[in-house]
Each structure stands twice: as C-alpha cells, then as structure tokens.
Image (cartoon, grey):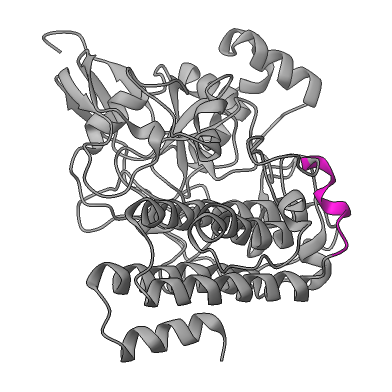
Amino acid sequence: MSPLNLLAAAVDRIKVPSRDEALAARYAAVRRYTRELAAPLSSEDAAAQSMADASPAKWHLAHTSWFFETFVLKPYRTDYREFHPRFEYLFNSYYRGIGELHPRDQRGLLTRPSVHEVMAYRAHVDKAVLEVLLRDALPPAAVDLLELGLHHEQQHQELLLTDIKHLFSMNPLLPEYRPQPLMAAEAPPLRWRLYSGGIAGIGHAGRGFAFDNEGPRHEALLQPYALASRVVTNGEYAEFIREGGYRDPRLWLSEGWAMVQARRWQHPLYWNHALDAEFTLHGLHAIDPQRPVCHISFFEADAYARWAGARLPTEFEWEHAAGEARIFGQFADQADAELHPRIFTELSSEPMYGSVWCWTASPYLAYPGYRPAAGAVGEYNGKFMSNQWVLRGGSCASSRSHLRPTYRNFFPADARWQFSGLRLAKELHHGT
C-alpha cells in the first residue's frame, strides 16, 4: 500500500487531534491528485520541456516534494534522512537563499532521475510527513509551512496541466491528454453589473490560509464602475480578429504592438489560422463561439477591451465585485471535469470564478505595509513584484479549494500558455 493510502487508512483508524487529522487528510488528497494528473503521461511525456517558461511534469512531481522536504522535514524533523543529496540542487526552483540551482531552461535535459525514481522520492517524503503528522510533532510554524506547501502544490498541479498542453501542442500528432467530448453550452447575454464604488477593504482579513502577497488588508478608493456579468467568448473575440484587431496599432500598447509584429500574433494561442479549430487537452476541437476565449496575453486582453469600448477591471474592482460571493464555477477537481473553459451558469447566477483567469489592469505590486516572510520562503512571492500583471478568479485547471476572493495570480504581459481570458469593465459617471 502506498504511503498516501497508509496515511488515509491511519487517519480513519487512529484518533488524532483535529488539527492534524484535517491536515493529514488534506495532505493525502492534494498529493494523490497530483499523481492522478500525471498518470496519463508516458515517461517520455513527463521528461520533455517545450519552452523555458514550462517545466517537465517529472520536475513538477519532484519539486513539490522538494518543497516539503526543504521547508518542513529538514528543519523540523531531526531524524529525517534526505532521499538524495543532489536533489536539493536539481529541484530548487528559485530559492537562492537555499543555494545554487539547476538552470530553469535545462530541466528538460534531466533524463535522470527517472520517473520511477521521482515517484519513489515522493513516497519517501510522504512517509516522513505521515509519521510526523501522526505523532503530532509539528510546531505551529511547521504547520503553517505545510499548509503553504499544499497550496504551492496546487499551483503546480495547474502548471503541470498548462505545461503538458503546451508540450502536446508542439507534437504534429496533437495527442489527447484526456480523451473526452466537450459539452455544448450557450453563453448568456452579456449584462453590466453596476457598482457605486467608495472605500473598499482589499486583501486577506486573516481568516484561513492566504499567500503573503494577499495582505496586509487595506482600503482602496473605487470610483463608480460597471463589470461584465461574464467573460468574453470565442465568438466575440473572433469578431475582433475579423475587424482587423491584430492589424490596428491604435488598439495596442506600444510594447504589445511590438510583440504582435515580432511574434506574428494573429489569434489566441492554440487557434488555427482558419479560426475554426483549437487545440485542447482533449485534442483538436472546433472552436465553439459560446466558450470563453483563453490563452491570450495581457496585451491582447487590453487591446480587445479598447476595441470593445471598455477596459480591463483593476484587481481591486474585481475583488470588490466578488465580495463574499460563494465560490462556484468550472474547476479541475470536479467529477468528470472538462479541462477546457466553458461558460458555467447556476440557475440565474454567473460566477466570478473558474473557466479562465481574468487579466486585470493592475500591475503586480506590494500592498501597503507588505513584508515578505523571513528566510528563504520569503522569496515565494515578493521577489516577482516587477513587470508582472495580476489575474483573478481561477480557471478550469484550478482546484476550487485553492481559490478565494483575495487570491492574486501574476504573469508577464506576454504570457499566453496559461488559461487566461478577460472580463470587461467600464467607467460609470455619476448619475448614470
């Protein structure tokens, strides 16, 4: 029986303190789900790297284990024996405070360790975490780091999917990660939700988990604004293309227009030139005009919004509009989940979450009073607060339990391989 199954069985049999019981169950679920995501991949699939921004699936499997080993087991379990002395170097991502690291763009050259060895590494780490949890031997600081590690792994679950999609798209065979038909769904008419603005509380309020970049909570002044009831669809974006959106420099930020020219962008990533088919994790499918447009950069989202007579919302407007609304939508951890964005409605309600991450007009900057955590783990978010833009809301590749109204995703303005789309916003004048 695998360590994760042993952990689940132990939690069922043994009465442990409620904190550790819940944490053990969550640890087992998150770690098992990562293995399930990797299960359809061959060893060759898991070892390849399609570009410098993406990582091999094998590397994601190892790095997430490295995180628990480095920040939880080594500091807080004196009897822990590391699995391999060179893994600290191979599977460190960007934590310079830990030491030297293997170049990111060369991860696809790591034919060794094998996938089998990486899975043995995961089992080794799982066994050690299980044992320390069942002994109730973790101090509060270590519990916080373990929870951070679980959310970190959920981020890598999404990256594993987006990176495999990019890799498979480079293969002329256009392989299916998960053979599955796509359901038809009709997008509801776009409506405008009106917000009066005012002083809004922004950021994490201190209840439950949050990354350090989600705080401190502070106040932001919002002018009256309107937010679209749903995200932009493929059909709407195709109209932008047909009307010359990629040929009109007046719609684009200067850097964006230079990117369009240099990279010959003519449509979203994974669309064909005929604008009638797109590559998905379920193989090549006809473009459904009713589905959300995705795999567009910040530059493309901004240009479309300008063409549509609107703009991108700020991240503060998005968070204010999301408010305390229940988190529902299209997520990867749903039964029989489609790993391709679709319009999701529940009765008369249209969600703020799931399907596609929404670009905002906000640069990724520190909130007033922000301080990164002490030590190497403080490199997690703060060091990237430059030349990045904030996305909100999660996607069809996200897990529902990983999202909250204050969650701030961030990527460079030219990033397209994530499940990124847009929701329009408008100014509201007093009396409108």
Image side of residue 181 versus residue 89, left or right: left
Image side of residue 89 versus residue 414, left or right: right
Q: Residue at x 79, y 56 (%)?
A: 86
Residue 11, picture quadrant: bottom left
Quarter that holds the C terminus = top left
Type of secondary structure dominating the magenta stretch: helix
Q: Name the spot of residue 83 as percent of width and height, x first.
A: 70, 68
Query: Closest to the observer: 298 or 51?
Result: 51
Query: Closest to the observer: 80 or 160?
Result: 80
Above or below, 231 relative to 327: above
Q: Name the spot of residue 204 as percent of width and height, x first.
A: 27, 36
As drawn, which residue projects farthest toward the left?
431
Task: Please indicate, yes or no, whether residue 287 appears anywhere in the rendered image.
Answer: yes
Above or below, 61 relative to 320: below
Assess whether residue 110 is covered by the magenta stretch. yes
Above or below, 407 relative to 120: above
Task: Please indicate, yes or no, whether residue 286 appears anywhere in the rendered image.
Answer: no
Residue 405, picture quadrant: top left
Q: Name the spot of residue 321 as percent of width and height, x first.
A: 23, 33
Image side of residue 57 versus residue 303, left or right: right
Residue 17, picture quadrant: bottom left
Assess whether residue 342 is covered by the magenta stretch. no
Q: Name the spot of residue 131 as percent of width and height, x first.
A: 46, 77
Magenta residue span: 104-112
Q: Residue at x 47, y 67 (%)?
A: 30
Query: Closest to the observer: 91 or 138?
Result: 138
Quarter that holds the N terminus = bottom right
Q: Which residue is drawn at 72% across and 20% down?
A: 259
